[in-house]
Structure formats: C-alpha cells, structure tokens
Image: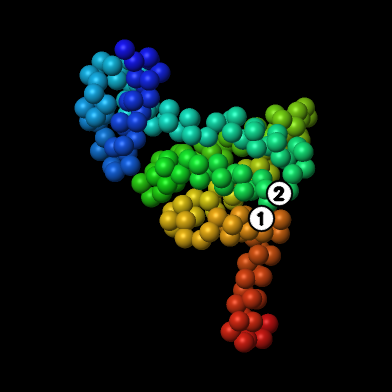
Amino acid sequence: MLSKDQTKQNIKEAFWALYEKNRIEKITVASICKDAGYNRSTFYAYFNNVYEVLDDIEEDILTREDFEKIILNNILYETSRQKIMGQIVGLYEEKNRYFTILLGDRGDPAFRTKLVKRIAPVIISLLNCQEDSIKLRLTYLMEYQSSGILSIITEWFRQGRQIPVEELIEILMSVTMNGIQKEMTKIIKADLVRKGKKL
C-alpha cells in the first residue's frame, strides 16, 4: 500500500505529464485520475482542483531553503558574484523540466512573480534587518535586481537556451555590475566599430 505522500506525488506526476503537452484549461480531474490510476475521491482527498496541483508543484520547485543555501554559502562569505550567478542558474537548470514549461509561452504567468517574491524576504531575514526603512529599501532593490535576473533567465529558457550557460552568466554579471544602460552602450559601440563606423 502506497503512503499518502507517494499517492500525492503520483497525482502531481500525472498532472505534470499532461501539463507538458496541454494548457491547464484543457486538463481535467478525470484525465489526471485516469493517468495516475486513482479514482476522483482519491484526487479530492489531496486537491480541490487542477489549479491546486499546479500551485503545489510550483511551491516545491524553488523553496526558501534553496535560496538560503546559496546566500548563506556564498554571499555572506564573500564568494565571487560570478560563482553565485552560476549557482542560481544551476538551480534553474536542475529543475529544467519544470522551468521550460512554467517560464515558457504556455506556462503560468503568476509563477514568475512567485519567484521574484521568494528572493527578497530570504536576504532581508538572513541579514537580520530590524529597521523598517532599511527593510523597505532592500525590498525595492531586491525587487529590481531579482526581476532583472529572472527576466534574462526566462528569456534564455524561452529561446531554447541558444547560448551557452557561461555566456548567460557573463550577461547576468555584466548587467548586475554595470547596469543595463552601460551594457547597451558598450554593445552598440562595439557594433559600430565592427561595421567600421565612427563613434
């Protein structure tokens, strides 16, 4: 006899196999039960609807502990930013089966927001900030930074990871260290030089 945790996982696996091929609107409780080999009452013992299954999977994908591990092991011990970026991208690649779908055109638009909201509270709590004004400033900074990093990684997945991961990390590092305007100017100038035009 399967444990409750295993039964729940089997339902999630059956859902995900369907979600990899269909939009969530096309997935029914009946189709999940058929593929998982359970009846509807078993499904409803764990979830109220298919959207709850997706939400549960999303919560599993990137946990607070994932980010705490990266931050504690690196940022607070002054590890190079490049290594940190590499570990963040590595975390995403490790869960590639999910990110390719969730961050793609057929994915859940709310998932991206969930990821951004996951990062800032972790850093603020680990830094043990007590003053509300500092917490607020850190929240704004992390919202900006997290959104930028996630947007680049999302586009990388959407484009089918057409550039090597090392090049992606280089882009992330450049934008993080220099800002988008400086990087755009550098690219435009390099293109003009390549074309033999004067700056």
Q: Amino acid at mark 2?
A: Arg
Nearest the eye: 180 or 87: 87
Task: Find numbered disc 1 in the image and state the secondary structure of the residue it sits on.
Answer: helix
Q: In the image shown, does 177 or 88 lie closer to the viewer?
A: 88
Q: Residue at x 62, y 71 (%)?
A: 187
Residue at the (71%, 59%) spot, across then down: 178
Number of residues whose C-alpha sits closer than 10 Å to that of mark 2, classed few (under 14), some (14–19) or many (20 or more): some
User: In which quadrant is the C terminus drawn?
Assistant: bottom right
Please determine whether, in this image, residue 57 is positioned above or below residue 112.
Answer: above
Q: Quadrant of residue 159?
A: bottom left
| Residue 107: quadrant of the picture | top left
Distance between mark 2 and mark 1 Cα atoms: 7 Å
Residue that extends furthest to the front in the rendered view of this protein: 1
Q: Which residue is mark 2?
A: 81
- Residue 19 coordinates in the image, percent (x, y): 32, 39
Q: Position of residue 125 (x, y in %)?
A: 70, 29
Count of marks overlaid on the render? 2
Q: Position of residue 4 (x, y in %)?
A: 38, 15
Q: Amino acid at mark 1?
A: Met
User: 137 left or right of 101?
Assistant: right
Residue at numbered disc 1 = 173
Task: Indicate whether 85 appears above or below 138.
Answer: below
Q: Earlier in the sequence, mark 2 or mark 1?
A: 2
Mark 2 in CB contact with mark 1 (< 8 angstroms): yes
Quadrant where the N terminus lies?
A: top left
Q: Position of residue 81 (x, y in %)?
A: 71, 49
